[in-house]
């Protein structure tokens, strides 16, 4: 998953980059508000982490322009820790607000919560973003229909278990579905084409099992 990290203090930016990269994120750095906007207009990011007090454009100005351009999750870091400061940031469109100083684990937990991946190992190639119903494979968003996403997420949530076709039908389509078990097989073929065959294994006489490939 890709993060745009905007911080004008070099040592702090380097430290934050190391925190995020160790957790499995891909990080693009910006030293001021102008660089942040240039990167934002050039690339697509899953999360923007930015300081409030930055040269050229401050954090509030950057947030306003980014939110006008497209929907993106934004986590603001700042030494401004008065209640009215937090209210101003949230009203502007910031999704979460963290006052300095903060612990690295808190920062990573806040970032993961915004992205909906708090229970996942971000170093793995397949990442689910449930609050957006998106899946990233090697940081690239997969093109999935709603039903394809629901089936893949159900398999992922039950990884390691041998699931019958009927279990999958009931969980993904509901009890009043009119599909037969061949529908599951058709969707499995589609998902294998999109994510590769290493994730979904056939369990003969039963159904299918999802597993994250070992590195």
Image (spheres, rainbow, N blue to C red):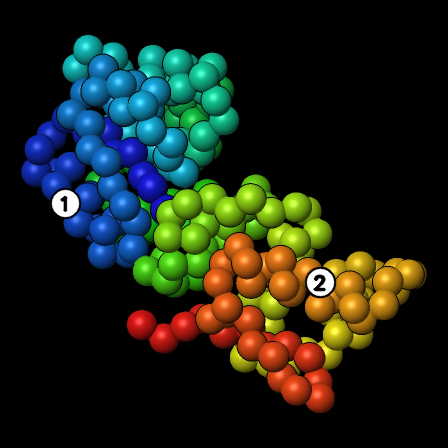
Horizontal side of 116 relative to 123 (left or right) equals right
**In this view, 164 is above or below 39:** below
Q: Point out the image quarter for the C terminus.
A: bottom left
- Give the class, few, some or many, for how many residues have Cα within 10 Å of label 2's Cα (few <14, many ≥20): few
- Give the class, few, some or many, for how many residues have Cα within 10 Å of label 1's Cα (few <14, many ≥20): few
Horizontal side of 137 relative to 104 (left or right) equals right
Residue shown at 63% from the left, 63% from the top: 189
Q: Secondary structure at mark 1?
A: helix
Residue shown at 51% from the left, 47% from the top: 142
Residue shown at 55% from the left, 44% from the top: 143
Residue shown at 43% from the left, 27% from the top: 94
Tell me how far mark 1 sits from mark 2, CA to CA.
Answer: 47 Å
**In this view, 72 is above or below 129:** above
Give the residue at mark 2: 186
Foreground tag (1 vs 2): 2
Which mark is on residue 15?
Answer: 1
């Amino acid at each position: 998953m890709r993060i745009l990290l905007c911080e004008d203090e070099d040592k702090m930016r380097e430290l934050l980059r190391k925190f995020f990269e160790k957790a499995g994120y891909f990080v693009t750095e910006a030293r001021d508000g102008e660089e942040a906007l240039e990167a934002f207009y050039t690339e697509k990011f899953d999360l923007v982490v930015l300081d409030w007090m930055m040269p050229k454009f401050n954090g509030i100005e950057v947030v306003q322009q980014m939110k006008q351009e497209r929907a993106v999750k934004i986590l603001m870091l700042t030494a401004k820790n008065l209640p009215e400061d937090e209210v101003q940031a949230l009203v502007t469109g910031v999704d979460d607000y963290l006052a300095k100083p903060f612990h690295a684990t808190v920062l990573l937990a806040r970032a993961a919560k915004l992205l909906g991946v708090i229970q996942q190992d971000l170093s793995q190639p397949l990442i689910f973003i449930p609050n957006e119903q998106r899946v990233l494979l090697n940081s690239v968003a997969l093109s999935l229909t709603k039903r394809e996403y629901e089936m893949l997420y159900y398999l992922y949530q039950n990884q390691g278990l041998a699931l019958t076709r009927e279990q999958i039908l009931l969980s993904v389509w509901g009890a009043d579905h009119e599909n037969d078990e061949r529908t599951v097989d058709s969707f499995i073929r589609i998902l294998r084409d999109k994510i590769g065959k290493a994730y979904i294994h056939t369990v003969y006489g039963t159904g299918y099992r999802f597993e994250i490939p070992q590195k």
